[in-house]
Amino acid sequence: MDLKQYVYTGNQTLDLAKWPTLPPFKIATSEIKTAIDKNIKQLASYQDKLYAQSRYGVLIIFQALDAAGKDSMIRHILSGVNPEGIVVNNFKAPSQQDLAHDFLWRVHQVFPRRGQIGVFNRSYYEDVLITQVHPEILLRENLPGIDQLADIPADFFSTRYQDLRHFETYAAHCGYKVLKFFLHLSQPEQKNRFARRIELPDKNWKFSEADIREAAYWPKYQRVYADVLQHTATTQNPWHIIPADDKWSSRLIVSQIINQQLQQLPLAYPQTSAARRQELQQILHQLENE
């Protein structure tokens, strides 16, 4: 599978309307599930070494509009990972404590430690996404000089984009690999998924009127997402734009990319020194003779 077609490094103006929401391949669902199972086992192997070595860390970010399949994506492709080696966080509306600090403060509170895979189901990118669609949210942050919407400077979001790029570069310098995925969903498919949440009783719990209200801002979200992805994608930390109208295909693509990226890390189990091996043999001998 050619994974380069899903990589966006910000080297061209981004028009999301020109990016497909369906994959370029047609594979039977049964074959896709078999391939994903294989990827899950491979990821478990990588994660075991990552955890044992405790030298590198991985942060996986999922951004998307409502109903794009973030939750099920995480549930399926990370199902084989040791729970001790993974932490998942969902960035909802900031709390009063969050608002009392800088906008990246809450990220540091939940950033994965070395040896862990951290997953952000939505992320710090919400602070440049929803705030552009609903800029009144910024008034809650008590930012210097911003008391009304007219006070928001023209370069406000450009500055935040710069902060996010620098933050991810900083993470890379510290030994973290940051993988960013945008699940690209079409408007008709989003409507279909909302309808199923209403029609199927076992999915009623997933339906929220708030999702419908936000769906009314679809054109603006498309423009804002394009702007955010374009200005925060770099060669070192690109965005992966994943066609998300077919959930199983999107899971296959993402699982392939994650494994490809972890394969690039020099993961290995810690080496045991000769002195330590001798010590362990003495302990073994003692255990056998008790």
Image (spheres, rainbow, N blue to C red):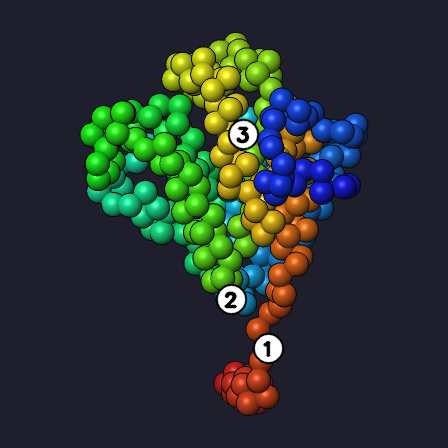
Label 1 sits on residue = 271
CA distance separating discs 1 and 3: 46 Å
Q: Does 48 appear above or below 200?
A: below
Could you tell me residue 219's position as x and y percent? 51, 17
Element under disc 2: loop
Say whether residue 94 is left or right of residue 56: left
Q: Nearer the viewer, mark 3 or mark 2?
A: 3
CA distance separating discs 3 and 2: 34 Å
Q: Nearer the viewer, mark 1 or mark 3?
A: 3
Q: Does 2 appear above or below 18?
A: below
Could you tell me residue 212's position as x and y percent? 44, 14
Residue type, label 2: Arg
Q: Does 36 appear above or below 246?
A: below
Crowd tier of the residue under label 1, counting other residues whose Cα lies within 10 Å: few below 14, some 14–19, many 20 or above? few
Q: Residue at x 54, y 30 (%)?
A: 226
Say whether residue 67 is left or right of residue 260: left
Give the residue furthest to the front. Answer: 154
The part of the image, by quadrant, that contains residue 188 is top right
Could you tell me residue 223's position as x and y percent? 51, 24
Which label is found at residue 255? none
Say whether residue 248 is left or right of residue 26: left
